[in-house]
Image: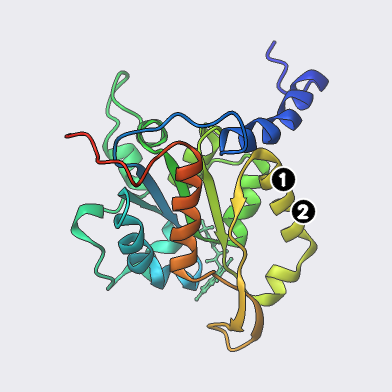
Amino acid sequence: MHAAGSGSDLEQRQQGPGEVHAAHGEQPAPVHVQRRPRVLLAATGSVATIKLAEVAELLLQFADVKVVVTKSASHFVRGQELPLSCRPVLGDDDEWRQWQAVGDPVVHIELRRWADAFVIAPLSANTLAKVANGLCDNLVTCVVRAWDFSKPLLLAPAMNTFMWASPFTEHHLATCRRLGALVVPPVIKQLACGDVGSGAMAAPADVAAACKQQLRAAGFDFELPLEAA
Ligand SMILES: Cc1cc2nc3c(=O)[nH]c(=O)nc-3n(C[C@H](O)[C@H](O)[C@H](O)COP(=O)(O)O)c2cc1C
């Protein structure tokens, strides 16, 4: 029987973050990667998804980008001009459209293989809770559940101040950090609902900068000339 919940398995998991942080740049020194990095950008059901195009544009300045969204996020994507190279935006239906028979590629596994970094910006309270508990009932959370934590996973939460202040939030974020995720913290400002407080997604430029920094630590050298594709 698979010992998923055994003590030794848990111990191994708890050692993970140290290994991950080492892999992200402390030691040993990363091997230089001479190609353009690939970033998978996910958006979830937060109002901050109205900034999805802006985040994608900024990431495109240094990486190839694919975009995945949850069903709730798609409400906020309508009407946005996403960069051509990021289209089509992938959602849950694409998992099933592209899988017809055994042997066909499975989208969330292919995306997990393709991406050098995974950025969830914005990250809703709901998806945060799912990620922290290993739930995987849509395309975005399936990629997280399959994620190789030696590669950067960045989370940029965005939610109402009351949700942000809930004890669930810190509990879930602590779990994600232990797994090796980097949290790009939200900022204080007037939220879409009119409340003023913490919970607004970090500035898109800060999310992109954090991603670039993580990729650099993972071995991508943005100063080297890229190899021809
Ligand atoms: C107009 C509107 C705005 C919302 N904004 C947020 C938000 O900023 N952050 C958040 O965590 N949830 C927000 N929600 C609730 C989420 O959309 C809801 O929890 C949803 O189930 C999230 O699904 P997902 O995590 O699969 O994207 C909002 C809901 C509505 C209707």
The relative height of residue 69 versus residue 138 in the rendered view (above or below) is: below
Secondary structure state at the residue bearing disc 1: helix
Which quarter of the rendering shows the C terminus? top left
157 left or right of 10 in image? left
Instruction: Let me know if residue 44 appears in the view.
Output: no
Q: Residue at x 62, y 64 (%)?
A: 185
Residue situated in front as seen by the camera: 214 or 46: 214
Q: Quadrant of residue 15?
A: top right
Secondary structure state at the residue bearing disc 2: helix
Q: Tag 2: Cα neighbours inside 10 Å, few (<14), some, or many (≥20)?
A: few
Does the Cβ of the disc 2 residue fall within 8 Å of ligand 1? no
- Please state the horizontal and vertical placement of residue 160, each as a whole percent of the image: 63, 75
Q: Quadrant of residue 79?
A: bottom left
Q: Residue at x 53, y 51 (%)?
A: 154
221 left or right of 197 in image? left
* Amino acid type, residue under disc 1 in the picture: Thr
Q: Residue at x 57, y 33 (%)?
A: 23
- Please state the horizontal and vertical placement of residue 200, each as a whole percent of the image: 57, 74
- Please state the horizontal and vertical placement of residue 50, each as a whole percent of the image: 40, 72
Q: Which residue is mark 1?
A: 175
- Please state the horizontal and vertical placement of residue 135, each as a whole percent of the image: 60, 41
The relative height of residue 142 versus residue 169 in the rendered view (above or below) is: above
Q: Which residue is mark 2?
A: 171
Dots 2, 1 in contact, CB < 8 A: yes
